[in-house]
Image: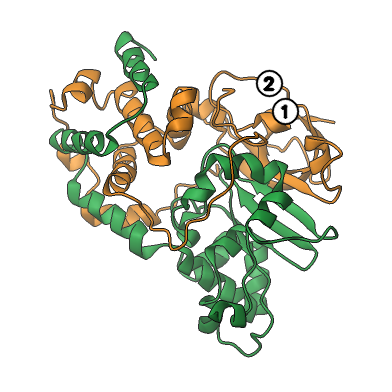
Chain colours: A green, B orange
Amino acid sequence: MSNDHDEEHLREHDRPLSGPALRVKALESLLVEKGLVEAKALDAIIDFYETKVGPHNGARIVARAWTDPAYKRRLLTDATAAIDEVGFGGSEGEDMLVLENAPKVHNMVVCTLCSCYPWPVLGLPPVWYKSSAYRARAVIDPRGLLKELGLELSDDVEVRVWDSTAELRYLVLPERPAGTDGWTEEQLAALVTRDAMVGVAKVPPPEAADR
Amino acid sequence: MNGVHDMGGMHGMGPVMIEKDEPVFHAAWEARVYALQRATSFHGTWNIDMSRFSRERMPPAAYLAATYYERWLFGLQTLLVEQGLVTAQELATGRAATKADATAALRVSDVPARMRGRLSARVAAKVPPKFMPGDPVVARSINPVGHTRLPRYVRGRRGTIHLDHGVFTFPDTNAMSRDPKPQHCYSVRFDARELWGREVSARDSVYLDLFDDYLDAA
């Protein structure tokens, strides 16, 4: 806050926000008029995050790890390179780590300070991941939170919560569900959910997914 | 800063509600403000740590009342004015007083490469690590008024170095003075009981990615 204008600008937001749609429209017009942004580039950015990236990318990584033991080893030792092999990478996925869930180890991911999330493999984060409730509770009461979300872990399971406080981004490798022996990578990818790759759910077995 | 954005461990925030078949954006303006942030950051006028700090400085009551992309709008407007891409007058009137060289803006043809581009905070500089995996550490009890990625809930708590991630830009100085101050960043494991007391499971733990400047030997 280097001058009075800036202080005034910040104080203005002490009031409740209203009409963000109008304010964003005015801001976009101003920035286009000033030559700072190109409107078509904005359309392309939105299209990229609405259609090109999303949990379907992460699902392919998980399915490959389930079917290819050598790939899984690479994924767990150098996740960024292994994910790049499948063709995914970029903003908010420059330095990736993959956490393997097992019968006695459950990993879940949060960003208590903001909304850090592995965009190239999961897309932009859902509202619940960015919510105050999730950011506040994931680290202090992961078991209670997971139970509310329908995942009750027994006492002998170790829960590891990963708070994304720096530039490392985390993807959970869920357990492969029973009843999927002989399934192809493509069939398996269709089973994998976003929530399982954040660590707030398990991948449901096929009969449950069909219901 | 000890802001409301530092939410780990707070109570009273209510249940976590997962929306079924959630769209990427819930309104057109959310998509536009997201894209505006990405497109304006192309100018390199600020770094990601400055972006995070711009949102953290939203007044606490407004921050808690705001939706996610309202915070982004606040942060973007703050950065645009502070970093001189737009004047407060222009923001207030919506009319451009001066114009920039439009050829320097992110072009539609450059978008895919930009979105897939690697802007890693990893730094090639050779900096010796202060700690090795297995070392006991204690997170410093510090209260910086500027940007920091050391949450309050681990300050003063003991943990163990789990992994050395290598050398990264240090967010605290990068946000405040653009000084990257390269140093090691580690995955540090804290027993859940060290953080939250004996009521929680002795098996559980919380891992944070913390920098040399946040840690002392324990």
Amino acid at pointer 1: Arg
Residue B136 locus on image (x, y percent): 84, 38
Amino acid at pointer 2: Ile
Q: Which residue is mark 2?
A: B142
Q: Is label 1 on the same chain as label 2?
A: yes
The residue that appears at 62% across and 39% down in the rendered structure is A136
Of helix, strand and loop, which one carries label 1? loop
Up the image or down, B39 lies above or below A76; here it is above
If the image is split into quadrants, where does the C terminus of chain A sit?
bottom right
Q: Is B159 positioned to the left or the right of B65 in the image?
A: right
Cβ atoms at labels 1 and 2 below 8 Å apart = yes
Q: Mark 1, chain letter?
A: B
- Residue in front for this viewpoint, B87 or B21: B21
The residue that appears at 31% across and 29% down in the rendered structure is B77
- Residue in front for this viewpoint, B19 or B185: B19
Quarter of the image holding residue B3?
top right
